[in-house]
Amino acid sequence: MDYRTLHKYVSGTQYVSVCYEPIVSLDDEQTIVGYEGLSRFQFDISPSLMIPLLEQANMISQLSTGIFKKIRTTAEKNPTKFYHINLSSLDIGNTSMRQLLH
């Protein structure tokens, strides 16, 4: 996959969606207390392959920012639950991402 294709997929929100994995209470193992937001690509490539490609191309923070914004929108509509997002170690050093998280 070349740089232009990667950029197209990361920049276009229509190519990436968020799936929410329920996080259940340890007390009863049934009550949903939150969700983990997982990125899903709208084309035939696994996140386990795409994420390393984006990290190598130094484009992972673009993806993380878009996913974070989608999760934040969902969380604002349902503030009684908590939401998790997995970040790359490259995101932690990204100034824009750190500002978003604060």
Image (cartoon, rainbow, N blue to C red):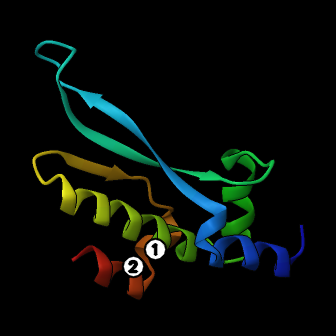
Residue at position x 13%, y 54% from top?
79
On the image, the x and y values in percent for residue 13 come to: 58, 71
Residue at position x 56%, y 77% from top?
62
Cβ–Cβ under 8 Å for marks 1 and 2: yes
Task: Name the residue that disc number 2 marks.
Answer: 97
On the image, the x and y values in percent for residue 96 come to: 40, 87
On residue 37, the disc is none
Task: Name the residue that disc number 1 marks.
Answer: 65
Seen in the image, is 53 located left or right of residue 26?
Answer: right
Image height of 26 relative to 101, above or below: above
Q: Earlier in the sequence, mark 1 or mark 2?
A: 1
Seen in the image, is 37 located left or right of residue 25?
Answer: right
On the image, the x and y values in percent for residue 23 come to: 28, 31
Within the image, what quadrant is residue 100 found in?
Answer: bottom left
On the image, the x and y values in percent for residue 17 come to: 55, 56
Q: Residues within 10 Å of mark 1 (few under 14, many from 20)?
A: some
Residue at position x 35%, y 60% from top?
71
Secondary structure at numbered mark 1: helix
Q: Nearer the viewer, mark 1 or mark 2?
A: 1
Q: Residues within 10 Å of mark 2 (few under 14, many from 20)?
A: some
Q: CA distance from mark 1 to mark 2?
A: 7 Å
Residue at position x 77%, y 72% from top?
6
Mark 1 belongs to which amino acid?
Answer: Thr
